[in-house]
Image (spheres, coloured by chain):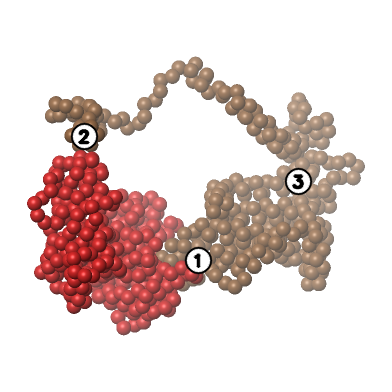
Chain colours: A red, B brown
């Protein structure tokens, strides 16, 4: 079991920047999920850890050993690929035994280990079959079995569940989590599916355009997204961001209304322990003579919908665009200043074209400055 | 409520009586296991199976071409199993036909150049020329498919260029070279020539096939701890079997049927290969058509049998190599 450290790791493919100055620590036994949109460099980061690619700059450490430059086999890692990468000409047992075979384990030892791992993953009945005769879920299990059979120190998974149907994905998610808890292997898991990221991880590393945006436990990522980009990436549907102008201690959202900035800042300060930097900025934001644009962020689940203007509090005015009944909740898309705002509500009381008033608790509001950094 | 209200039930579900609406749905048990067979009379079936005019026309064209293709072969076969007196009048006259294996027997033991010996000689040349090309070909194709090395594109282009050269033109150079090395009129010399000419297309063919093997498999093997050589032997070679079979069949047919190279490079009659022997069977007084036909059938039979035997693999390899 090892801890993994990436230090200013960059990877270029010709002119393309795949990763830029990635810093990442994965502690011993941790389940870290790298989450990001397609093309953000998360798979490249994983392949750098695996040794399938070598970094253009920077260093990778397993505990205190510097491993960049070493071959994958010298790192004692295991990896599960998106398409499983099972050897089609070998049976399940041969597939699982392959890493042991090339490492010179005796046939008896091999059989014993293969037996152990197949029973752990409930695929004992499949060992004589070829991968082509298996279902997606079974292939997935074989790939996992092949990965854990030689007890690696690091376990890498590249979107392993994306080829499974929804029900199976749910099942394998808990199975994977169980397995990781039992084996206590340091795990790095790459996905673009935030549900997977949130449900399985100890911590999530959000990546965008080749670099890490935020590393935090799932709840913190949801409660306190560090940048406007992360805020809009996490959550389903994503957080609403309103562009506004800061004026006299409040945010002017044009025709839609005005939000009292001091209220938001005070509420935030009461809840979250703000760093010194935030304090300075908060004060600056409140200064009545300064002007500039800020973004106000509110999650759809924190917006309340009313047909009549409420007597007090912060109100944003808009017109209902579409209503999407989702069963569990109803998603109302409200047009505010030509921007579509999502609100999750439990009752259907409005229909298209209605004038509505969106209210929210100041505790649930986020303010991002022009750089997209969280200030309150 | 608005008219397009998505929450308002519409259609057959609408209205009261929801408690009993299970009448409107089928239970999964009601779904038959197999599709019902249509009950049709013989008459309608026959009428339906008569192709439409356009389609019938296509069939006629296709069948005509197929017959044209196969007629010479049938003629050859008929000539080989009938005595010369019967062939002279035309093999297509079927009345009073006698079937005899006399021609085969005579061809096998023909005095100037017995077919039996010639077939054996041909095997001696063809088998090494095929096996070596397969082995060298896959070993050369793998780097072209997977590795990055200097001048890769240039070298590959060079291989393609050699393929475009006409053998008749190069044969002169080959002839001189073989004489220099003392390999003229030896099987070793002929085998080397065949290997050289075969490698070009084999490398191109196998490279295309190898490109279709997912790189992920090799990466998985690298992570599993396999060396480059282990990956080649345990992953790449077994997965290339269909392509290697295709290469074997095509190269075998090519070398087996080759007439020009043995003609130029083999001089001693006892070393002659089967295609070389055929023209010698013409006879002195009159052309021994039956003898030639029997010899041709025997020569042809070997690649045809090989092809039939390996057809399943051969097709898989061809499709995969061409599809990518």
The CA distance from mark 1 to mark 2 is 69 Å
Q: Is residue A59 visible?
A: yes
User: Front-most of A17 and B17?
Assistant: A17
Which label is found at residue B233? 1
Q: Residue furthest front?
A: A289
Which of labels 1 and 2 is toward the front? Answer: 2
Q: Is residue B308 left or right of residue A135?
A: right
The residue positioned 60% from the left and 68% from the top of the image is: B152
Residue A179 at what x, y percent from top left? 24, 64
Residue B199 at what x, y percent from top left? 66, 62
The residue positioned 62% from the left and 29% from the top of the image is: B59
Which of labels 3 and 2 is toward the front? Answer: 2
The residue that disc 3 covers is: B295
Packing grade of label 3 (10 A; few <14, some 14-19, many >=20) is many
Q: For the residue labelled by badge 1, is the local secondary structure a helix, a strand or a loop?
A: helix
* 3 or 2: tag closer to the N-terminus: 2
Q: Is residue A119 visible?
A: no
Q: For the residue labelled by badge 3, is the local secondary structure a helix, a strand or a loop?
A: helix
């Amino acid at each position: 079991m090892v801890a993994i450290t990436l230090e200013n790791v960059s990877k270029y493919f010709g002119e393309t920047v795949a990763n830029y100055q990635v810093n990442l620590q994965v502690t011993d036994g941790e389940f870290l999920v790298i989450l990001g949109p397609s093309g953000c460099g998360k798979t490249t980061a994983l392949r750098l850890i695996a040794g399938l690619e070598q970094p253009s700059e920077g260093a990778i450490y397993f505990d205190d050993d510097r491993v960049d430059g070493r071959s994958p086999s010298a790192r004692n890692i295991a990896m599960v690929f998106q398409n499983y990468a099972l050897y089609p000409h070998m049976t399940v047992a041969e597939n699982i035994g392959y890493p042991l075979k090339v490492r010179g384990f005796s046939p008896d030892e091999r059989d014993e280990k293969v037996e152990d791992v197949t029973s752990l993953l409930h695929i004992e009945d499949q060992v004589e079959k070829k991968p082509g005769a298996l279902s997606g879920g079974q292939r997935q299990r074989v790939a996992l079995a092949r990965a854990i059979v030689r007890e690696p120190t690091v376990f890498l998974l590249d979107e392993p569940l994306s080829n499974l149907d929804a029900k199976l994905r749910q099942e394998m998610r808990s199975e994977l989590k169980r397995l990781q808890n039992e084996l206590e292997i340091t795990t790095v898991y790459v996905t673009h599916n935030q549900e997977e990221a949130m449900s399985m991880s100890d911590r999530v590393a959000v990546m965008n355009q080749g670099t890490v945006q935020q590393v935090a436990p799932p709840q913190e990522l949801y409660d306190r997204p560090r940048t406007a980009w992360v805020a809009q990436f996490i959550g389903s549907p994503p957080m609403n961001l309103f562009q506004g102008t800061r004026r006299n201690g409040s945010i002017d959202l044009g025709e839609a209304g005005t939000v009292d900035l001091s209220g938001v800042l005070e509420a935030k300060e009461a809840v979250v322990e703000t760093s010194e930097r935030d304090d300075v900025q908060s004060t600056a934001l409140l200064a009545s003579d300064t002007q500039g644009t800020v973004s106000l962020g509110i999650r759809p689940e924190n917006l309340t919908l009313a047909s009549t203007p409420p007597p007090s509090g912060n109100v944003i005015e808009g017109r209902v665009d579409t209503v999407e009944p989702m069963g569990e909740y109803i998603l109302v898309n409200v047009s505010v200043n030509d921007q579509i705002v999502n609100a999750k509500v439990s009752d259907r009381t409005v229909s298209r074209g209605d004038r509505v008033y969106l209210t929210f608790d100041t505790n649930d509001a986020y303010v991002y400055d022009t750089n997209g950094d969280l200030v309150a | 409520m608005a008219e397009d209200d998505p929450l308002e039930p519409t259609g057959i579900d609408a209205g009261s009586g929801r408690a009993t609406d299970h009448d409107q749905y089928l239970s999964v048990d009601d779904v038959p296991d197999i599709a019902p067979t249509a009950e049709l009379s013989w008459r309608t079936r026959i009428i339906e199976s008569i192709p439409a005019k356009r389609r019938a026309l296509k069939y006629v064209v296709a069948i005509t071409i197929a017959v044209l293709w196969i007629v010479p072969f049938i003629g050859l076969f008929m000539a080989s199993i009938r005595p010369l007196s019967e062939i002279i009048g035309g093999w297509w006259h079927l009345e009073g036909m006698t079937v005899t294996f006399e021609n085969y027997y005579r061809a096998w033991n023909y005095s100037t150049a017995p077919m039996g010996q010639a077939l054996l000689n041909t095997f001696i040349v063809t088998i090494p020329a095929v096996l070596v090309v397969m082995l060298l070909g896959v070993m050369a194709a793998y780097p072209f498919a997977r590795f990055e090395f200097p001048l890769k594109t240039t070298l590959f282009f060079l291989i393609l260029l050699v393929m475009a050269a006409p053998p008749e033109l190069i044969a002169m150079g080959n002839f001189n070279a073989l004489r220099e090395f003392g390999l003229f009129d030896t099987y070793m010399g002929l085998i080397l020539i065949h290997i050289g000419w075969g490698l070009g297309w084999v490398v191109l063919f196998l490279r295309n096939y190898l490109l279709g093997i997912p790189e992920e498999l090799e990466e998985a093997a690298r992570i599993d701890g396999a060396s480059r050589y282990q990956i080649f032997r345990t992953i790449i070679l077994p997965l290339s079997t269909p392509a290697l079979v295709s290469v074997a069949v095509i190269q075998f047919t090519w070398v087996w049927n080759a007439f020009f190279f043995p003609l130029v490079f083999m001089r001693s009659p006892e070393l002659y290969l089967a295609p070389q022997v055929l023209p010698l069977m013409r006879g002195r007084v009159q052309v021994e058509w039956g003898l030639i036909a029997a010899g041709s059938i025997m020569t042809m039979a070997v690649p045809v049998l090989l092809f039939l035997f390996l057809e399943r693999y051969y097709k898989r390899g061809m499709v995969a190599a061409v599809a990518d």
